[in-house]
Amino acid sequence: MGAVDFGFAAGDTVLITGAGSGIGRATARHAAELGLAVSLWDLNPAGLAETADEVRTTAAAVHTWAADVSDDAAVDAGFTDAVRTLGPIRYLHNNAGPASSSDIPFDRALEICVGSVRRMTDTWAATGPGEGAAMVATTSVAGNLVGTDNAWYSASKAAIMGYIRHLAAHRATEFRSNGVAPGMTDTPRLAGFAGSETGQRVLTRIPLKRMATPDDIAWATLFLLSPLAGYINGVFLPVDGGWTVTQ
């Protein structure tokens, strides 16, 4: 099997939030394998350091920033540091967000989840990412195609996709915008869920009969960011093994 080639220019940079584990770590790992430089952001310094160590030998360059992406000052400082270290940031993966099990008041949760995507995107765009720039946000089938018990999670994921559609329609001359929408994914946040009664019930309705892996989501994300997807803009891409077609 030959090397994967999505058409990225060697040394171009992708910034990934929530890079300390799960989908963000998998995206960082495969981005590094594709020859990209990576700016890795996460709230958890230990997880961030583990991801950086994992990709350091393959990435064109590595930058890390431990920060809360819902904090204006932290985001501004992080972009200043990242651009100074790596140069222009061509690609952005808005992946960070609280777990659906988090006990957060509804209004505050939307402010964190949707506001951070807007904050990161606007700040990134203001740095001048250049020709071929693209942004992908991690949305979810929850809220967009199925409902969940958690009101803020469903609402925030639907709102993020609404924001992506706005960007795709009104800022396409600056960058492309798309949403990748995981279904049930085997990350630390869902540890043990597949073995639970609810998890087993969901698994029986997934045509592929398994949870997604973080790699499944990472490859879809990188494709949407890549030059190969240069005419894809405003798309909501479920990566759910066919789960939602059975609803």
Image (spheres, rainbow, N blue to C red):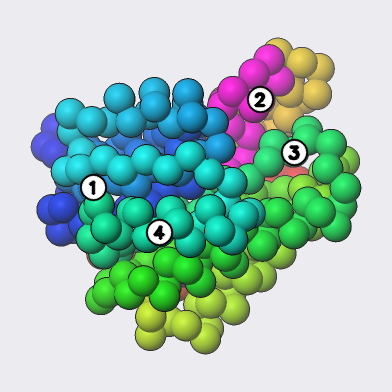
Q: Residue sitting at 42 percent across and 66 percent down?
A: 124
Q: Is there CB contact under 8 Å for labels 3 and 1?
A: no
Per the image, the residue denoted by label 4 is 79
- The amino acid on which the numbered mark 2 sits, given as a three-letter code, is Leu
* Residue 161 in sight: yes
Which is more N-terminal, label 4 or label 1? 1
Region rendered in magenta: 176-194
Which is more N-terminal, label 4 or label 3? 4
Per the image, the residue denoted by label 3 is 100
Q: Residues within 10 Å of mark 3 (few under 14, many from 20)?
A: some
Per the image, the residue denoted by label 1 is 37
Q: Position of residue 114 (x, y in %)?
A: 67, 60
Which is more N-terminal, label 1 or label 3? 1
Q: Position of residue 125 (x, y in %)?
A: 42, 73
Q: Nearer the viewer, mark 1 or mark 4?
A: 4
- The amino acid on which the numbered mark 1 sits, given as a three-letter code, is Ala
Which is more N-terminal, label 3 or label 2? 3
Q: Quadrant of residue 203?
A: top right
* Residue 145 in sight: no
Which is more N-terminal, label 1 or label 2? 1
